[in-house]
């Protein structure tokens, strides 16, 4: 009989296999559901436990805070009472007394030790020690006296040197001083032209055409007088003698009398201007001004210094 051509009879093996597979799948799903449910339950329990733990901690923290506030209030009341200050003062006094007592005990102990050493030593040996200490003290005293004498000698030499330097400085200043001779006053009938010497420049009060110089000077008019204030950086620089020489050359030599109002900060400029005006053949005079004197004032009756 040919078995290869035989067909299997109908059986329930395939149905049974299918049912087993389905039942196994149901069991697997049930297991998964149970696992998921237990996991969620554990999470819920852990969350509930965590929340409960946090609640307990919060209650405990509140209790600690209340205890701390009560303790702080108690300490504050004790501080306000002031009794602790007296206790602290007493403790400080006790500490100081204890330190003084310790120092006194140490001093007594040292003194006793010294006395014991002195009593135990031979008087002759003790005398030799005292004499040696005395000799050392005398040597130190002599050395100190020698140093004092040397310092005094140095001070004396320095004072002499200082006096010599002061004399040299005075002589040098005397050499640098230029003797000035104030000219004698005399009357003149010539037209007086004023020149303000300040800031190292010469400021003519009048232009070459005898008009008021408002380029280099600031004029302020008051009731009875006028104030001329030089403008810094303006005017004629006497170091460049050409401009000032041209000004003098433009004036008639027999009619102008130059008066210089010289401020103390510009005396070298006046020296140069004086040389130029003298070389031009003009008579001149000058008046010294201090910086604290303020600007030059021309009164309504005329600011006319005595010709010099």
Image (cartoon, rainbow, N blue to C red):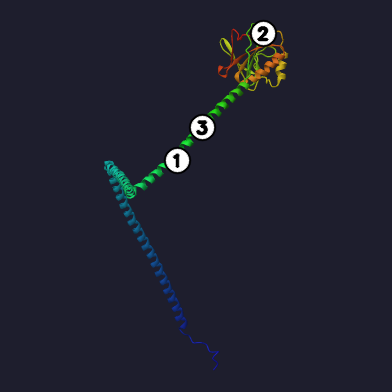
Q: Secondary structure at mark 3?
A: helix
Q: What residue is rendered at 41% in x and 67% in y?
A: 36
Mark 2 and 1 residues: CB-CB less than 8 Å, in contact? Answer: no
Left or right: 276 with respect to 228? Answer: right
Q: Nearer the viewer, mark 3 or mark 1?
A: 1
Secondary structure of the residue carrying numbered label 2: strand
Say above or below: 228 vs 40. Answer: above
Q: Position of residue 133 (x, y in %)?
A: 40, 43
Asked if the residue at tag 1 contacts the one at tag 3, i.e. Cβ–Cβ closer than 8 Å, the answer is: no
Location of residue 233 by image quarter: top right
Mark 3, other Cα within 10 Å: few <14 / some 14–19 / many ≥20: few
Q: CA distance from mark 2 to mark 1?
A: 88 Å
Q: Residue at x 36, y 47 (%)?
A: 124
The crowding category of the residue bearing disc 2, from other C-alpha atoms within 10 Å (few below 14, some 14 to 19, many at least 20), is few
Of the residues under marks 3 and 1, which one precedes in the sequence? 1
Disc on the earlier residue, 2 or 1: 1
The residue indicated by pointer 2 is 191
Residue 199 in view (yes/no): no
One can see residue 49 in this view: yes
Residue at 44% x, 38% y is: 141
> On the image, numbered disc 1 is attached to which residue?
139
Q: Which residue is under mark 3?
A: 153
């Amino acid at each position: 009989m040919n078995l290869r051509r035989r067909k299997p009879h109908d059986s329930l093996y395939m149905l049974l296999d299918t049912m087993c597979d389905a039942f196994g799948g149901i069991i697997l799903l049930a297991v998964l559901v149970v696992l998921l449910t237990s996991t969620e339950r554990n999470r819920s329990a852990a969350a509930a436990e965590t929340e409960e733990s946090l609640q307990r901690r919060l209650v405990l923290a509140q209790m600690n805070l209340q205890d701390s506030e009560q303790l702080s209030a108690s300490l504050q009341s004790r501080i306000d009472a002031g009794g602790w200050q007296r206790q602290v003062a007493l403790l400080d006094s006790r500490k100081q007394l204890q330190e003084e007592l310790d120092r006194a005990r140490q001093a007594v102990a040292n003194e006793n030790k010294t006395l014991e050493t002195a009593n135990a030593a031979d008087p002759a040996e003790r005398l030799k020690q005292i004499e040696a200490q005395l000799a050392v003290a005398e040597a130190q005293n002599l050395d100190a006296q020698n140093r004092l004498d040397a310092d005094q000698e140095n001070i004396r030499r320095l004072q002499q040197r200082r006096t010599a330097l002061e004399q040299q400085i005075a002589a040098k200043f005397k050499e640098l001083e230029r003797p000035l001779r104030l000219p004698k006053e005399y009357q003149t009938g010539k037209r007086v032209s004023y020149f303000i010497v300040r800031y190292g420049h010469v400021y003519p009060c009048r232009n070459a055409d005898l008009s008021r110089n408002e380029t280099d000077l600031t004029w302020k008019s008051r009731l009875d007088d006028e104030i001329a204030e030089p403008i810094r950086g303006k005017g004629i620089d006497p170091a460049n003698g050409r401009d000032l020489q041209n000004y003098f050359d433009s004036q008639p030599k027999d009619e102008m009398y130059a008066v210089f109002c010289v401020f103390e900060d510009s005396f070298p400029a006046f020296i140069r201007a004086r040389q130029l005006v003298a070389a031009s053949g003009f008579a001149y005079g000058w008046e010294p001004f201090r910086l604290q004197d303020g600007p030059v004032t021309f009164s309504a009756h005329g600011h006319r210094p005595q010709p010099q």
